[in-house]
Amino acid sequence: MYNFVYNIPTKIYFGGNQISNLGKELKKFGNRVLLCYGGGSIKKIGLYDEVVEEIKKAGLELFELNGIEPNPRVTSVKAGAEICKREKIDVLLAVGGGSVIDCTKAIGAATFYDGDPWDLVIGKAKIEKALPLVSILTLSATGSEMDIFGVISNMDSNDKVGFASKEVLPKVSFLDPKNTFTVSPYQTACGSVDILSHIIETYFNQEESMYMLDTFMEGMMKTVIKYAPIAMKDPKNEEARANLMWTSSWAINGFVSACQTCTWTCHPIEHQLSAYYDITHGLGLGILTPRWMKYILDETNVERFYNFGVNVFGIDKNLESMEVANKSIEMLEKFLFEELGLKKHLSDLGIDETHFEIMAKKACNDGILKGFKPLNQKDIENIYKMCL
Amino acid sequence: MYNFVYNIPTKIYFGGNQISNLGKELKKFGNRVLLCYGGGSIKKIGLYDEVVEEIKKAGLELFELNGIEPNPRVTSVKAGAEICKREKIDVLLAVGGGSVIDCTKAIGAATFYDGDPWDLVIGKAKIEKALPLVSILTLSATGSEMDIFGVISNMDSNDKVGFASKEVLPKVSFLDPKNTFTVSPYQTACGSVDILSHIIETYFNQEESMYMLDTFMEGMMKTVIKYAPIAMKDPKNEEARANLMWTSSWAINGFVSACQTCTWTCHPIEHQLSAYYDITHGLGLGILTPRWMKYILDETNVERFYNFGVNVFGIDKNLESMEVANKSIEMLEKFLFEELGLKKHLSDLGIDETHFEIMAKKACNDGILKGFKPLNQKDIENIYKMCL
């Protein structure tokens, strides 16, 4: 029950004025740097110029890949890997949110693979090696800055698939809360829901996890619930941005999930939503999570919901377990749909049940989704319908 | 305020049956291993035989240093460093509690220093390099298994001094809760107080630390308070031992102290007690901590005590801050002196005020101890007297 290996060697520079360490850190891995980024928001906030200056100051050679998509595509992975091979890149520098970092992770792995990079994503081929990766985070959400995961989409087949490998764990990440000051209220909300969902997926576990780690998860959930609305209203609130940023990393880096015995549920169900409709991942999770909770809550798992209600939302511990459990879901809905102001229904996004059957089938890989409560294809379809 | 570097690359094998990874991990650093341990309790629990078998199975050459003291002495550091130099040791293996690991850290550093190892402890010389260190923990207390600190005593001068260096951070540590099943109730209590004290020293901070990290510290304090009495009554309770063990590492490894702005107080005050009277460190901390709290509590710092009382001891949040603060100290005393059954007074240990003046002088280095509330020599003497 308490058996695990903890191994998260990523070095983190947290806070302002840390970028002066960038050149030195990149140089440890070589001289040829591929800078990967998205649609150019890093230029607007001046970060691009800062980064380029540091790279030049350190005497490194700079190459670039831009235009990485919000749900990053395997076509970008291919393009990046081609540059790495052609230009003999030594180290990757991802500057952006989770999508950019995820894509850069896949580029690093694809550089050492001669086949179709999609093979590495779907596990048809194993990631044996990857280029060293340094990241500069601009959006608190996926935790990619300190974890071994990535998610890549293939628009040809409407597939959005996660991969995992120790080889792609960032060596160094720069987390400056100020780099998230321009994140819009909506993206702040969606990112925060993603963080919260990572913790919820881990906290709701078939077995009791370690009590100490439960307290950490409860603390992180309280942190997100406290600070997400503040960051939305007051985007330059450093305290709020710092707390959300550091929580994003620790929610998913493997620390609190050390004793976890079951796999995630809402993420695979949501991945089908964003694969089919290209909606923001955090929004999809926000719509799904309370419905999933209502669908699975029963006498066998009510205690976990009770702890969630008492320790995260401060619900009176003297109430009946089931009452606390139901209240906790209400409180979560209030947080998501009132405080964060997220859309509550898939129909609000123009989504109807056309693809629910095939999406549900994909979400459980034609079988059972072995989460906190195992779900079959029909269950997943029902949950999608509850979200309409 | 939120500026720090997080860099804790120690790899942890947690739980049972992990020792089979020992040979492989040691081998990464070379073939010649110096096994360091204490008074032989590791032989009684069979751990010594297991370790030797793994080392032999991996084809490594084994050297030994035993007899490291509970408050490890600089004489042992010298003896160990001489073996390392003479036998060209590649990697150190510390098997024991914090004292053994601390001493082995100092040995690793002293191996690369030609002068008196005490220079490295007191900072007269800088630790430039150290041998790689692997540890197997047998007592949950100091956190040495995952931190950069060590404490060494010099009995010639009644000095007990802490040192810190990234060079001595263990590369790999094995944390098997079962290896602490034979720790006596008294040592379990003292170790738990040490853990609790590390968190308290960090939690009571002049500035607000990061909220997320506060919740972690509160969670760790709750963990110690919940499980220390269980482990005392039921020594083979794996859940309790596992929670105490993992908390010992995270209480002091640098994670929760990232935003800390002031230095520790009770530890330097206690170090004089164990330097002069060779008492168990955790016992000294247990006697000192509530007295220190009473001595420093005032209107300027009452809010931190309020949070401590509400979030750790579950005191009614609607009470007046000062009432909650006073209650929290009472609850702490109840935990220490009733639940853990620790002696409450220095006089119970045969200690009188003979050395208080010089001890207080040493504790503040002839100046001010710049902790949560700065203390001068007279203050420290007063606190010692409150403990009589």
Image (spheres, coloured by chain):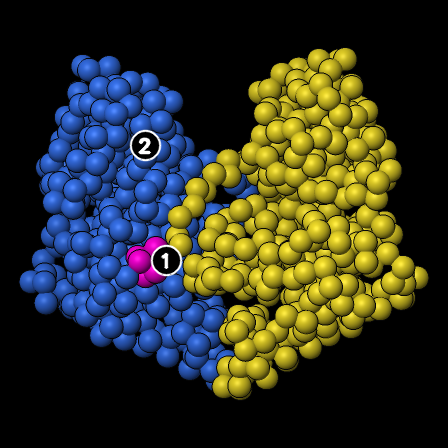
Chain colours: A blue, B yellow
Q: Position of residue A269 (x, y in %)?
A: 26, 54
Quadrant of the rendered image containing residue A23: top left
Residue span colored magenta: A238-244
Toward the left, the furthest residue is A350
> Residue at 17% across / 20% down in the picture?
A82
Compared with A100, A332 (above or below) is below
Circle 2 sits in a helix, a strand or a loop, which is it?
helix
Quarter holding the C terminus of chain A is bottom left
Q: Give the distance between the C-alpha atoms of the residues marked 1 and 2, in whole angstroms.
A: 23 Å
Amino acid type shown at disc 1: Asn
> Residue at 34% across / 60% down in the picture?
A239
Amino acid type shown at disc 2: Leu
Residue A240 included in the magenta stretch of the image: yes
Q: Nearer the viewer, mark 1 or mark 2?
A: 2
Residue tagged 1 = A243
Compared with B198, B344 (above or below) is below
